Image: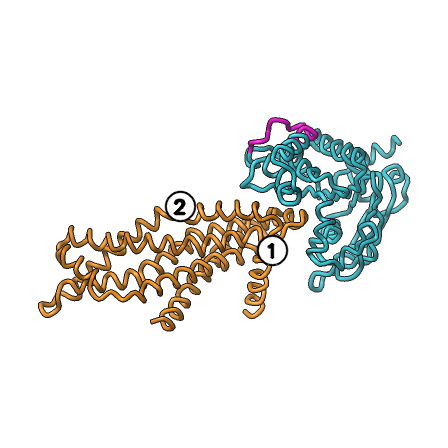
Chain colours: A orange, B cyan
Amino acid sequence: MFYSLGRYIILLRLSFKKPEKFSVYWTEVMREMVSVGIGSLGIIAIISVFIGAVATIQVAFQLSNPLVPASVAGGISRDSTILEFSPTISALVLAGRVGSSMASQIGTMRVTEQIDALEIMGVNAPGFLIAPKVIAGISMIPLLTIVSVGLGLCGGYLACVITRDISPSDFITGLQADFNPIIVTVCAVKSIVYGFLITSICCYNGFYTEGGALEVGQSATRGVVYSCVMVLFADLIVSSMLL
Amino acid sequence: MIEVKDIYKTFGENEVLKGISAKFEPGKNHLIIGGSGSGKTTLLKCIVGLHEPTKGQVLFNGENFTEMSFEQRVPIRTEIGMLFQNSALFDSMTVEENIMFPLNLFTDKSRSEKLDRANFCLERVNLEGKNKLFPSELSGGMKKRVGIARAISMQPKYLFVDEPNSGLDPQTSILIDDLINEITEEYKMITVIVTHDMNSVMGIGDHILFLNQGQKWWEGSNKEIANTDNKELNDFVFASKFMRAAKAKL
């Protein structure tokens, strides 16, 4: 475990060395941002709407008590969407979509000697392959989380319109009541941390792939599993520190 | 000149290279041959710095490459071209982008100059007009030729080639050998080729290094190979009936 941790840290240090030529690296960063950001928009939109809707329906069900104002469900739904559902569930989905793609891409490059080809040319392979992906992760995953929060709340509103468990006006009232801005800070910190963890852990697993197609698949799976576990661990740490 | 001095390489308990020394001179094709597991590719990877030797030195024009840091190696590496066994073209880039990649990173040429150089390299390997194709759209032989075009794009002093004929039909193999031979003479490069192919050995082997069980077993030229009394080398080179018949006619 300490061997892997040490190797992970050394790889990250190598990844953020001064680039050979900034313009070539910048092109790679842009390419990765499009892949992570635009490429994940569809799946994030779908899961966010459904999660927002389900969260609202379940909260409304649990608070169906004449002594509790109906608008409270809107507030709880908002806080749980911003604090937990959007950043964490989006991160877990993105670990599967983005992380596995990164690990298998780099793993394939390793087993087909493309990484050796980079090193022979004198290119800092970790810097060229990993840094753009990590930068794309820590910049695009927070943006995707913002989209997810917005769509999650829209999903909650839609659930109110469709099911009438609580009225849409009560839901809107709940959304606006007792808003504490710290939850937005926590959400932003979580998404940045998750972006870093997902991309760096998956790239690490891909970079040290040895063997052939079977091992590439195993690296991708290992990358997704480790990054999901670390996301949940980071969730606990960030929540306990900031709330 | 490249000089390899007493190279040892161990993986765990397994000693793959056992004290190999050799000199590689410009303008010649240097072939490293030997059976599977004899340490050919490991030696090549030690020379180019993909593996660090357990003991010994690799000198590029007298400079000790093995003791250099990654940054110190960069100027020498920009003078190295390498063709890998599976070509190792970057999948996400077109043929043209593959060839221009080292030029983008290590030169300050304008885009049109880089394009001209890419076109020249493609013409040199008889692949003009294939600029916009992706590696997945190329045949095995074409991939090798694009690999050679990328390797020569920086006008290297040293060309390293790992199994250039693997997976190719005999005609394409000869085409690739001839191309490597022409380029070596044209640019006065030091070309080091790891191969199993006996056509290459007899055709372009100016200097041959035969490895057996991690040791240098024999060294000489393709002209000398037929007359050697080295048993292991004879068993390896003249393993097929065809080669034995060819030897008998010599």
What residue is disc 1 on? A18
| x and y, in percent, of residue A7 in the image | 58, 64
- Can residue B33 be seen here? The reply is yes
What residue span does the magenta drawing correspond to? B122-133
What residue is disc 2 on? A38
Nearest the viewer among A213 and B153 is B153
| x and y, in percent, of residue A188 in the image | 37, 61
- The residue located at (81%, 37%) in the rendering is B188
Nearest the viewer among A129 and A106 is A129
- Can residue A165 be seen here? The reply is no
- The residue located at (38%, 53%) in the rendering is A143
Could you tell whether A178 is left or right of B234 in the image?
left
- Position of B31 relative to B178 (above/below): below
Could you tell whether B210 is left or right of A237 in the image?
right
Residue type (three-letter) at the residue carrying disc 2: Ile
| x and y, in percent, of residue A166 in the image | 13, 58
Determine the secondary structure under disc 1: loop
Chain label for disc 2: A
Q: Quadrant of residue A18?
A: bottom right
- Quarter of the figure that contains the C terminus of chain B: top right
- Position of B174 relative to A143 (above/below): above
| x and y, in percent, of residue A165 in the image | 13, 57
- The residue located at (79%, 54%) in the rendering is B58
Determine the secondary structure under disc 2: helix
